Image (cartoon, rainbow, N blue to C red):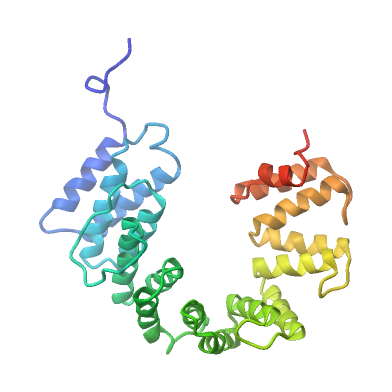
Amino acid sequence: MTLTPATAPSAPGDALLAETERAAAADPLDPAYVEGLCREIDGRIVRGDVMIGILPVRAYEVLVRGYLTAARAGRSDAWVVLGRRLLSLPVGQPPAWPSPHPFPTSGNDVLDAALRCFAEAAGHGNREGAYLFAAVGREAVGRVGRYALTLLEPLRADDPTGEARYWSGILHYLLGEGEAAVAYHQRAAEAGNADAMFELHVLHDTGDAVARDEAVARQWLLRAADLEHPRALYNVAAGHASGRGFPRDEAVAAGWYERAANAGNARAAATLGVMCLLGSGVPTDTSRAAQWFDRAEEQGFDVDGWLEQLGMSRPS
């Protein structure tokens, strides 16, 4: 017999959702408890409980409302997680709440709400909130970029990793202020920030905002690669594979591609798969190729589409 929704038994996750709603409405409120319940829902969503029906679809709505309740009660980390979830989950229309942080965006209500979340977190001294605001708003212009710089300003005074200065450089570049961008990236790189080193590599390699200088670009690239920066490792590998800026040596390139893949660069993993298929710089090994392709796919790379462009296919 097929059960209708009205007669079907409750899903096991309903009790968790009901407790989250009860806790969020309680007076007095325990925001830490509410946030803890939300994180449990969050974990279940990530492992796929909604997709397989263990949690009902309304879990998304309960999650967002719960995080918002905890965040407005002073849990700054909840602002950060809420912003992330608004961007990654099918939450529909995001919740409205009184906020001094409305920002002009492309009209995407979810993006606007996420930016407000990150700004709220930053306003409570949460560094990650400030960095996420800069990262998510980096393609926006005008007041979003300017406001991001105001959030980063107090963080630059105590910036041992150079991250606040790195993001300041990114924003100044996007705002068309190349000289300021280079200056901030230089300071971030001096603090050991590999992302800033890679940006300096790109700027010197292209002659964007600075005089083009391949030798300086290569120095910054190698410094970033020494810190296991995924894109820097990939570029060094590609340089050895092509002979551009480095001695051409496919075996050496394969070693750098492997370092890049182990650092999380999906394209490097896919490239290694192709090299294993062709026997370029490494022994021909279809089993090893399949492993690299699987790794690349796990990291979000469209392996089949890329192989099709190359006129190749996966090993059977």
> Image quadrant of residue 114?
bottom left
The reply, left or right, for residue 133 in relation to residue 14 is right
Give x and y (percent) for residue 11. 30, 30
> Image quadrant of residue 187?
bottom right
Question: What residue is rendered at 56% in x and 84% in y?
Answer: 185
Question: What residue is rendered at 66% in x and 67% in y?
Answer: 231
Residue furthest to the left in view is 27
Question: What residue is rendered at 81% in x and 75% in y?
Answer: 245
Give x and y (percent) for residue 84. 39, 58
Residue situated in front as seen by the camera: 41 or 138: 138
Give x and y (percent) for residue 59. 30, 42
Q: 197 above or below 6? A: below
Residue situated in front as seen by the camera: 217 or 71: 217
The reply, left or right, for residue 236 in relation to residue 303 is right
Give x and y (percent) for residue 263. 65, 62
> Disc count in the image?
0
The C terminus lies in quadrant: top right
Residue situated in front as seen by the camera: 212 or 50: 212
Q: 272 above or below 192? A: above
Residue furthest to the top in view is 1
Q: 120 above or below 168? A: above
Q: 140 above or below 49? A: below
Question: What residue is rendered at 72% in x and 51% in y?
Answer: 270
The reply, left or right, for residue 273 in relation to residue 230 is right
The N terminus lies in quadrant: top left
